[in-house]
Image: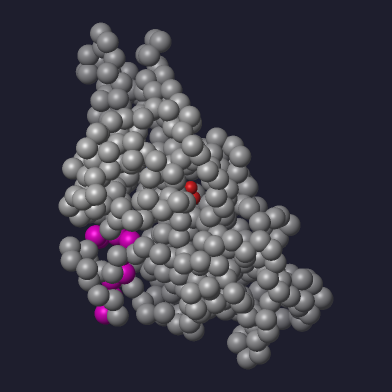
Amino acid sequence: MSNEHSYDQDRANELAWRRARLPGVSRRHFLQLVGGSAAGAGVARLDGHRHRLVAWQGEQAIVKPAPPELFVRNDANLEMRWEALYHRGYLVPNELFFVRNNSPVVPRLDASTWRLQVEGSGVSRPRSFTYDELLEMPSTSVIRAIECAGNGRNLFEVSHGRKIPGTPWNLGGIGVAEWTGVPLREVLERTGLKPTARDVMPEGLDRRQVKRPMPVAKAVEDDTLLVYAMNGQPLPPDHGFPVRVLVPGWVGIAHIKWVGRIEVSEAPLFSEYNTTKYVLIGSDYQAQTPALGTVLTTQKVKSAFELPWNGDVRAGRRLLRGRSWSGEGGIVSVDVSVDGGRAWQPARLREPNIDRAWVRWDLEWDARPGPQRLQARATDTHGNTQPDRVPLNAEGYAHWAVATHLITVS
Ligand SMILES: Nc1nc2c(c(=O)[nH]1)N[C@H]1C(S)=C(S)[C@@H](COP(=O)(O)O)O[C@H]1N2
Ligand SMILES: [Mo]
């Protein structure tokens, strides 16, 4: 077991202990009881108090089934296979939605004991909220994308000949769902949000306690939500049960899962996730001290084909399908080349075309035998068009240049 793992385990136990507050159980006894979980023994059971625990149930890195026809698995991450969307509709069903976890284990939280603590210098009435309190507040449903900042990382290998360490996404680190929850603004208002408040930083209850700040202006937008349902189902454990944050248009890391605390501050806030990670580091990017690079916020415009990556299709006429999206708004046009960029033709955009979600498009394709190079170039409602090339950055984020999708037609 690596030092990092035991360090994480200690922190997990500490957290579980703090949340458990069990009458008549010493901390040492508690650690003995949960100790089994480090070896994968499963749920910590403490008489009638089991429900009070953060249970590292069976040490699962991913809870939902991950059949190989739907996902490419990399450690605790699941990449959606784009070809699995071809025979589906606008939304990505929960069982096909990609998963990206920075912590090695999905925390299993109990909604009846879960609390959301809202505190910090930016609020005058710090307090906590229960799950039921959130459910009773005014709610809204929105259709939006969540996309990992590193989606497309592998494309730097083609464009720059550089294999960049990190989750090796092709383009399947994105999904669109209908999210239901309470506007974060409602919760901040009930906590006495001060006019001087500046940053809002949600924090997860996973082992790494992932947290990342946003300005108050983003936190109070109509569609920035504390989400408890995904596509009409209670939020699944992999996606942040009982509650996650939705920060439309922003890099995936902003959408904190398993949220347990929100710090609201009059001073700017920082975490490793907006200083050393999830920033663009490279000679073409400005450092925003104390961040090591340009801090990532809004996602760029991108496109993908609903075809297997480096896969095969049968020769003949078929409907070529794909989707394009932008963190800034909607999509106004998509041009496609089926000959490696020589000739381009407009794709037909299909309804709906929802801002900060995606649009589906298609065109007729007479697939001729041999290796084929497919490309799509989208333009969003803010006039951003996918470029031919983007400068390299150290962590391989934001590859939004036109991608070449290789496909063998036989
Ligand atoms: N608490 C917590 N929230 C998190 C993460 C995490 O590791 N811990 N991963 C983030 C990243 S990097 C992404 S891309 C999205 C992925 O959301 P999903 O797994 O529901 O698709 O969740 C974000 N929220
Ligand atoms: Mo991510």
Identify the residue at horizontal 21%, vertical 50% (top origin).
Answer: 196
**One can see residue 127 in this view:** yes
Number of marks drawn:
0
Identify the residue at horizontal 50%, vertical 78% (top origin).
Answer: 383
Q: Is residue 97 above or below residue 278?
A: above
Front residue (pair 9, 201) = 201
| Quarter of the picture holding the N terminus | top left
Identify the residue at horizontal 44%, vertical 44% (top origin).
Answer: 183
* Coordinates of residue 281 in the picture (x, y in percent): 28, 71
Magenta segment boundaries in residue numbering: 275-283
Q: Is residue 377 left or right of residue 246?
A: right
| Quarter of the picture holding the C terminus | bottom right
**Magenta stretch holds residue 278:** yes
Outermost residue, front side = 195
Magenta region's main secondary structure?
loop
Identify the residue at horizontal 61%, vertical 85% (top origin).
Answer: 340
